[in-house]
Image: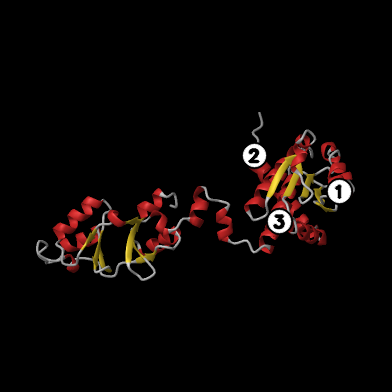
Amino acid sequence: MKKNNHLNVGRRTIRIEAKGLEKLAKSIGNEFNEMCDKLIQTKGKIITLGIGKSGHIAKKVSATLSSTGSPSNFINAAEALHGDIGGIHKSDKVLIFSHSGQSKEIIDLLPYLKNLGCEFFSITGSKDSIIAKSSCLNIDTGISEEACPLDLAPTTSTTASLALGDAIAVALLEAKKFEADDFAKSHPGGKLGRSLILKIEDIMKKDKELPIVLPNDSLAKTLIEISSKGLGVALVIEKSALKGIFTDGDLRRALNKKVDLLEAPISQLMSKKAKTITYSSLATEAIKVMQENQIYSLVVVNKKKKPIGLIRMHDLVEAGLV
């Protein structure tokens, strides 16, 4: 039995699809501008419509639009014929995905869309198809070769449709000046969302959780405070001012010094130049500071530079940011 070379097939598939995308990038013209201008004026939602493989693409594009500042819903064309079309309103704009441009389920919906009075646009593989000719605006993907050797399974064509959908979403995103903070609001879950919205004050240790000692306190008292709070460090504070920080690294250095550890105040053993970060900073900023300075904890300060908390690498790991 002849052994298949899957790697060659995989590379060939990717090259064919990449060739199709390159051709598409060169062929799209002012109709893309016009479509984006129309979509950005949508007072309702952008409804993506499709069936079969094109339906899957339409659903993904809808999700991308919604997450980048353009509210959108996906409707399956077959389900639309049995009631879901009620989810389309005159204030909406419809973006149809159909490679053949001849999908019967979509064609059956066109009279309803026209009677409703909402504008509808299409992305097809044939500008001469019924759907393309019926649409207010049409973008032809111009795909003539599928990656499938039988030229049957939608491959290059669906990749092209997806790329166009992404291109539209990004064009609208930039036109609306959609920023990282806006993106964070629609992505509150997962590592990405947390990294964009979680601030130092949300996860820092504070108040009674903080291990605090005075500059004149002894090493013994400091170690007791560290042990009781379980954070591995102690903040040396006097009259609400940060004097330094005492860590396990300072303890190791203290053991190598010719100092009477039982009598010396902690001010002689602490690190006087403690690294700090403001409470309103993003938690991801703490990761950068710690990595740059090869440390595992930062003192959190308020706007007046007064110490109000402590954040450790362990806290950032627990928050799912590392």
Asked which secondary structure carries label 2, the reply is helix
Asked which secondary structure carries label 1, the reply is helix
Residue underneath mark 1: 132
Q: 101 or 70: which is nearer to us?
A: 70
Residue underneath mark 2: 6
- Compared to residue 210, the image places residue 82 above or below, namely above
Is residue 154 in sight in this rendering?
no
Amino acid under disc 3: Ala
Asked which secondary structure carries label 3, the reply is helix
- Quadrant where the image shows the N terminus: top right
Residue 106 horizontal/vertical position (percent)? 82, 40
Q: Which mark is residue 167?
A: 3
Q: Which mark is residue 246?
A: none
The residue at 37%/52% (across/down) is: 315
Residue 281 image-quadrant placement: bottom left
The residue at 90%/48% (across/down) is: 128
Q: Earlier in the sequence, mark 3 or mark 1?
A: 1
Q: Earlier in the sequence, mark 3 or mark 2?
A: 2
Residue 78 horizontal/vertical position (percent)? 78, 35
